[in-house]
Image (spheres, rainbow, N blue to C red):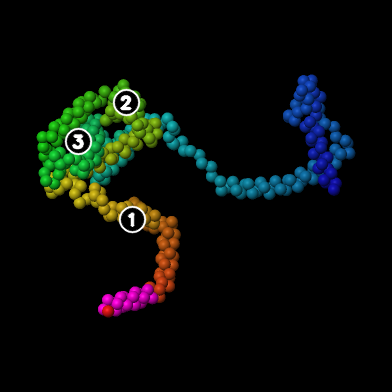
Amino acid sequence: MKFSAAIAALFMASEAAAFVPVASRAGAVPNSVRYSAVAEPENAEKAKVPAGLEKELNSLEKEIEAVNGDEKAEQAKEVSASLETVKVFVPPPSAPSISEWDRIEPGRYNDMEMSLAMPMLKRPSKLDGTHAGDYGFDPLGLTESNDLYTMMEAEVRHARLAMIAVVAWPLSELVAPDWMLQGSNHLAPSVLNGFNPASFLATAAIFAGLGFFEFQTSLRINSIGTEIGKKHRADMQDVWKYGIPGDYNFDPLGLYDSFGDSAVGRKAMRELEISHGRWAMVAITAFAAWEAATGHAVVENRMFFEPNALLPALGVGWFVFNQIYEIKNTDQYMFQIETTSEGEMRLEEANRKMAYLAESAKGLGPLVESGIETAKGLKKKVDEFQEQ
């Protein structure tokens, strides 16, 4: 009871100190602002507490401090123990800043002696990982005897043309009229398959337009003043002054900055483009070689170009496989198939359902046998009726 009364008195005293009229504590103020709960100035008057109550409050405060002291000591031990397990992440001083992503740093592979693409050969000196698509692949040494910019320009232009052709070739054999195609098997017009007058004129007109465009954009100085060219020159300022090979200043959909409006983001998009272009060059070469060797169209009897159930079945199988297994590559082996933890759970659930279906099928056995006997009886009656 005494403790409760003391607490109440302490609360009332603190409230009285907080709401002392402002005019009496800090000088005259407008009448509209007479009371306030703001912090007291240093020269503010303190609220007066009766002498008897003040003594009681002092004694109570000492008791509370003694209790709190023991509790704080225990809390300090707990905090000290927990701090031993806390690790604060501090970014390493070598972490790149945002500004370092706005330019390409040359010599990514300078520390590698052997080629990344062909580990049995030494890395070509000019292929140091600076440019997009550079994996150190140059077994014939073409980059040593030719201008690197020119070689990159030729590759990216052929890659873009191949990506168009690898789509147009089978599409023409599927939908083009027969008079545009070659032979009885309706092959796409090409150097190896031949041309008829109509397809030759169409092909010549297309290549004439492409050739003019190539001539207009072939010189590396053409992209200096363009919007994208200015970005490229800033990106490559630590490498050379030419910008990027294959810069047409063409990006109507704004996809070039899909990976970020920075030098690193634009390089990632160029990596994607040249990788697809290289596969397209391989594919279009395979198309031409196949038709020249066999005389049959690449779309003939191919599951990718004709309606069939095999391709969807393969797609479903691949989806199910990825729900259960994963393929890992280690420093010693490649294509190691392992069951994931989620896959194990899915397999267990599938086994339980199969066991349940098997038990249910056992219960259906007598019903099936009864149905068979009934069918036999009906057949017998039908036969007897027909004999009469």
**Of helix, strand and loop, which mostly describes the magenta segment?**
helix
Tag 3 near tag 2, CB within 8 Å? no
Residue at 31 percent of width and 41 percent of height: 112
Residue 37 % position (x, y): 75, 30
Q: Which numbered mark, 3 or 1, is in the foreground of this view? A: 1
The answer to which of 348 and 65 lies nearer the viewer is 348
Which residues fall within the magenta stretch? Answer: 370-387
Left or right position of 87 against 78: left
Residue 142's mark?
A: 3
Residue at 31 percent of width and 53 percent of height: 312
Q: Earlier in the sequence, mark 3 or mark 1?
A: 3
Between the C-alphas of marks 3 and 2, the distance is 27 Å
Between the C-alphas of marks 2 and 1, the distance is 46 Å
The answer to which of 374 and 18 lies nearer the viewer is 374
Q: Is residue 149 above or below residue 311?
A: above
Residue at 30 percent of width and 23 percent of height: 224
Local secondary structure at mark 3: helix
Q: Which numbered mark, 3 or 2, is in the foreground of this view? A: 2
Residue 317's mark?
A: 1
Q: Is residue 351 above or below residue 145?
A: below
Q: Is-magenta flag for residue 311?
A: no
Tag 3 near tag 1, CB within 8 Å? no
Q: Which numbered mark, 2 or 1, is in the foreground of this view? A: 1
Between the C-alphas of marks 3 and 1, the distance is 43 Å
Residue 343 % position (x, y): 41, 57
The 10 Å Cα crowd at callout 1, few under 14, some 14 to 19, many 20 or more, is few
Amino acid type for the residue under numbered disc 3: Leu
Instruction: Determine which residue is flagged by label 2.
Output: 229
Residue at 28 percent of width and 26 percent of height: 242
Residue 336 % position (x, y): 34, 56
Q: Is residue 166 visible?
A: no
Tag 2 near tag 1, CB within 8 Å? no
